[in-house]
């Protein structure tokens, strides 16, 4: 079992084993890869690269996963709807669509093989209240069918039998491949795989600088603490053959440490608050989504957790910091107005602010922005992941494979 470094001050640079990735035998770096960011995506990438190394060399991986928090999966990965998306909402050729569909299938396949990923394939209804929204559902059906996504209309009479608390005036589109998942269980699986193949994890560790060397390796400066309460940090510089920037909200800042100023990114933060319904009645057995009004949000939808608890959200508001994680109670009246468009019999006095999440963005509009996953030109081995918002959770295992393909020269989807 791999040693998990609670922080990198527990070892010195000279003690780092010099194991090599792929056929890069001419290099003598501390690590083959440093993966920055221990969310669901970063941890999956680290696990996949570690598996690649072991299969190629038969030796333990020389990969470091650096996470600035005290544990993995604490930011965007843990503060969302927990939905396994079907892949309906974006253009068919968008990376977000392709990776969502592939990632969905990978999650379900892994669970079917006994991997302990906690999920439920509960399905989702998208409800239309007028003819314009019904036409939108017609378009979704055509697009989804062309992508191989199972979809079907549910008659309004049948819907009343199945979900009497759901109101749909015109049409309902059923997405049976939509589900819910515990993000922590995916991360735990990836973490176990990473350890199995010899990877190292350094918690409470942040990256403060990255420099490309003349040999096209990377010197990464990290600062680490012994505990959450510590204010003192120890600095260490490690050399890596390659760096993966999967830092979520911090990804633009990490990228800007290395890329020239003309290629810098600005981070923007779109906050979504969720509201808990403090009752088990009425009972709803699947996710309920209104027709979305824009790309920025899929609307204030109803989701359930694995225990059957109902929650509504997220809404959408721009904030100045990714640390603004207090749900906004001022948004509750607007949420109630949206919810009562498609729900019957709710006691709205039992709706309370629950939690909030932040969508990491690199544009400050609601316009569609695709995932950016690429090896940056002029920086061989440096792979950037930017704008990894929804459906990042669903796509996580597929994103890991996508990054693996970049390093292995395999054509991607």
Image (cartoon, rainbow, N blue to C red):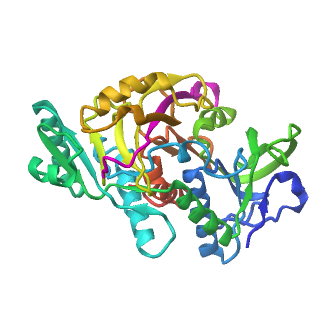
Above or below for 326 versus 181: above
Residue 361: horizontal and vertical position, in percent? Answer: 50, 32
Residue 297: horizontal and vertical position, in percent? Answer: 37, 33
Residue at point 58%, 68% (across, down): 52
Residue at point 88%, 56% (across, down): 10
Magenta run includes residue 283: yes
- Give the magenta range: 260-284
Residue 307: horizontal and vertical position, in percent? Answer: 44, 57
* Whether residue 212 can be seen here: no
Q: Is residue 320 left or right of residue 120?
A: right
Query: How many numbered circles are shown?
Result: 0
Residue 275: horizontal and vertical position, in percent? Answer: 45, 36
Magenta run includes residue 393: no
* Whether residue 323 can be seen here: yes
Q: Is residue 28 left or right of residue 114?
A: right
Please state which of residues 268 and 354 is positioned toward the viewer in this rendering: 354
Q: Quadrant of the N terminus?
A: bottom right
Residue at far bottom of view: 58
Examine the image and state in which quarter residue 379 appears: top right
Q: Quadrant of the C terminus?
A: bottom left
Please state which of residues 272 and 264 is positioned toward the viewer in this rendering: 272
Q: Is residue 150 left or right of residue 184?
A: left
Residue at point 73%, 48% (across, down): 70
């Amino acid at each position: 079992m791999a040693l998990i470094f609670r922080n990198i001050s527990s070892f010195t640079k000279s003690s780092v084993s010099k194991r090599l990735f792929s056929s890069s035998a001419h290099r003598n770096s501390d690590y083959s890869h440093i993966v920055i960011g221990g969310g669901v995506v970063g941890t999956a990438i680290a696990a996949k690269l570690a598996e690649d190394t072991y299969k190629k060399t038969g030796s333990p991986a020389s990969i470091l996963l650096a996470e600035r928090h005290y544990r993995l999966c604490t930011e965007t990965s843990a503060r969302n709807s927990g939905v396994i998306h079907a892949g309906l909402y974006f253009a068919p050729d968008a990376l977000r669509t392709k990776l969502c569909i592939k990632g969905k299938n990978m999650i379900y396949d892994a669970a079917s093989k006994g991997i302990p990923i906690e999920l439920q394939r509960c399905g989702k209804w998208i409800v239309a209240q007028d003819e314009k929204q019904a036409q939108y559902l017609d378009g979704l059906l055509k697009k989804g069918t062309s992508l191989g996504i199972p979809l079907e209309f549910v008659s309004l009479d049948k819907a009343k039998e199945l979900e009497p608390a759901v109101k749909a005036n015109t049409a309902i589109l059923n997405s049976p491949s939509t589900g819910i998942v515990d993000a922590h269980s995916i991360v735990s699986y990836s973490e176990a795989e990473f350890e199995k193949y010899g990877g190292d994890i350094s918690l409470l560790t942040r990256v403060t600088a990255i420099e490309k060397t003349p040999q096209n390796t990377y010197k990464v400066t990290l600062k680490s603490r012994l505990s959450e309460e510590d204010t003192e940090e120890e600095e260490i510089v490690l050399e890596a053959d390659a760096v993966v920037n999967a830092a979520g909200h911090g990804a633009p800042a990490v990228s800007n440490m290395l890329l020239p100023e003309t290629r810098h990114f600005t981070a923007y933060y779109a906050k979504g608050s969720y509201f808990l319904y403090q009752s088990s009645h009425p009972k709803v057995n699947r996710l309920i989504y209104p027709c979305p009004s824009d790309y920025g949000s899929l609307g204030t939808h109803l989701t359930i957790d694995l225990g059957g608890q109902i929650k509504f959200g997220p809404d959408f508001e721009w904030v100045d910091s990714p640390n603004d994680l207090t749900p906004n109670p001022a948004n509750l009246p607007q949420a109630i107005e949206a919810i009562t468009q498609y729900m019957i019999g709710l006691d709205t006095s039992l709706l309370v602010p629950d939690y909030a999440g932040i969508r990491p963005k690199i544009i400050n509009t609601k316009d569609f922005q695709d995932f950016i996953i690429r090896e940056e030109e002029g920086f061989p081995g440096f792979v950037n992941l930017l704008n990894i918002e929804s459906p990042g959770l669903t796509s996580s295992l597929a994103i890991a494979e996508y990054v693996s393909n970049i390093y292995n020269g395999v054509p991607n989807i």
